[in-house]
Amino acid sequence: MIQTLEQKRAQHALNKVREIERDYQGEQWEKFVSYVENLPATILTGSLGQAAAMLLAQAKGDTRDAHYILYGSLEDWLCRDDPQAPYRAESDLMAAIVNHDRTTYLRAQSEALAWLEWLKKFAVAFLKKPDRTGR
């Protein structure tokens, strides 16, 4: 079966959320959901590069930190070995961002926002706990 790019985005995002659900605990889930919910606005007000750098800075080198997990998930999507990936088969998102041209960068930023729509939907659906009002 040939998947559309939209289906690939959804599948990848769902797989990432399932990994987090399996490998981390409730507090990490809540932090991850919060960061996912805010990342699109951060990208739109700054840029993809600044948002990615912020995630790395806030993680402070801790690979189990929710900021780092989100950065790694974004890197995994944008740098995957797929002809449709903006930074195809790159191993380091930050290096790819600074070493490619503006057209590729803008494509990567647009792709990140499209993928984040799915990641946010799945993160909220599977990882977010209802608040006290039941929402």
Image: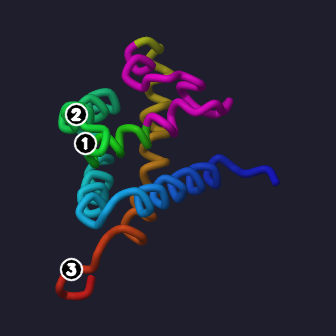
Q: Are marks 1 and 2 in contact (CB under 8 Å)?
A: yes
Task: Please tell me how many numbered marks the rendered image carries.
Answer: 3
Kind of residue indicated by mark 3: Asp
Q: Say if the magenta span includes residue 92.
A: yes
Q: Earlier in the sequence, mark 1 or mark 2?
A: 1
Q: Mark 3 points at which residue?
A: 131
Q: The residue tagged with tag 3: helix, strand or loop?
A: loop
What is the quadrant of residue 85 in the picture?
top right
* First in sequence: mark 3 vs mark 2: 2
Marks 3 and 2, Cα distance to the nearest angstrom? 28 Å
**Label 2, residues with CA under 10 Å away: few <14, some 14-19, many ≥20:** some
Q: Which label sits on residue 54? A: 2
Residues shaded magenta: 75-98
Looking at the rendering, in which quadrant would you find the C terminus?
A: bottom left
Residue 52 visible from this viewpoint: yes
- Alpha carbon separation for disc pair 1 and 2: 9 Å
Q: Residue pushed farthest bottom?
A: 133
